[in-house]
Image (cartoon, helix red, strand yellow):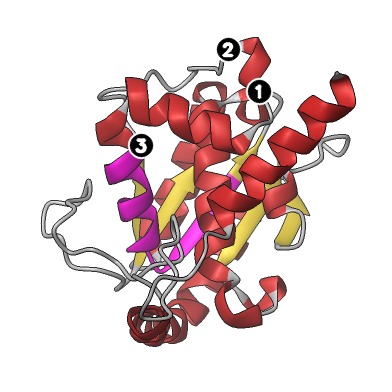
Amino acid sequence: MGLISWFRDLYNFFHFVFPRKDKEGKIPGFLYKSDDPSIPDYHADGEPFGRRVFISFARGSLPVAERFESSLRKVGLEPWRYKPKEVPEDAKMPEREVGNLAEQGRYLKEHYPETLRLLPATLRRCSAVLFLVSEESLQSMLCELEAFAAMSIHTLGGRPPTDAPVYVILESPELRPSPWLSAFWRRIYEEGLEEALAIVIAGEIDAQAAILSLAEQYRRQRYR
């Protein structure tokens, strides 16, 4: 039964991530489709891209996140982080559903529908994404959703992950990022990294915003 269950979960995952094309030849993907402007995000103005940086982290990493925020602001960037509205930051999936992305998507849709809409919309409209990986974040339902969203958005069309504006910081050397983040740029945290990384992101963000804008045009042609 264990093998049958594994194949069923694998089938559900691929059907969730790679759905069939419709009659017009477009793919009704989860995050692959073009951005829907009717879905609001957590930014007041609703304008996409620009100099926004989405910060993903678990509650225990707040002091580190605040240091990164301060450094990003000093170089003219606009950091954003999720503040609990509908889902507690430390919310975890029921044990039977941990690691099963399709089940997690259904769980969020059933229990936290607004977060499932607004959080990915906010992430995809930021020009860069910063992940602070900790033991706590690796167990977080929201952090896993954000990791999958970043992978879906920033590897579209075979783009090399190392060229994408996704920056992964490991809070200790023994940590391994989520599989969704394993191919992106990453470093182990050390004192002073906040300032150095902020300068790197600031130097790249305008070009990355332009690339994301072009990617949205591509999505509108291929996805629905």
Residue 156: where, in percent of width, then height? 56, 74
Q: Are marks 2 and 1 in contact (CB under 8 Å)?
A: yes
Question: Residue 94 shows which numbered tag?
Answer: 2
- Image side of residue 44 versus residue 60, left or right: left
Figure check: 44 above or below 50: above
The relative height of residue 60 versus residue 142 in the rendered view (above or below) is: above
Q: Secondary structure at mark 3?
A: loop
- Tell me the kind of residue under disc 2: Pro
Q: At x 19% / y 53%, what residue is drawn?
A: 39
Q: Residues within 10 Å of mark 3 (few under 14, many from 20)?
A: some
Three-letter amino acid code of the residue under disc 3: Tyr
Q: 29 or 143: nearer the eye? A: 29
- Regarding residue 55, the answer to whether it shows in the image is yes
Q: Earlier in the sequence, mark 2 or mark 3?
A: 3
The segment highlighted magenta reads: 116-131
| 119 within the magenta span | yes
Between 194 and 32, which is closer to the camera in this rendering?
32
Q: Position of residue 20 (x, y in %)?
A: 52, 64
Residue 94's place in the image compared with 19, above or below, is above
Residue type, label 1? Val
Q: Which mark is residue 98?
A: 1
In the image, what residue occupies the spot 85% across and 18% down?
Answer: 1
Give the quarter of the figure containing the C terminus: bottom left
Q: Please provide percent x and percent y for residue 201.
A: 52, 70
- Callout 1: SS: loop
Residue 82, labelled with which disc?
3
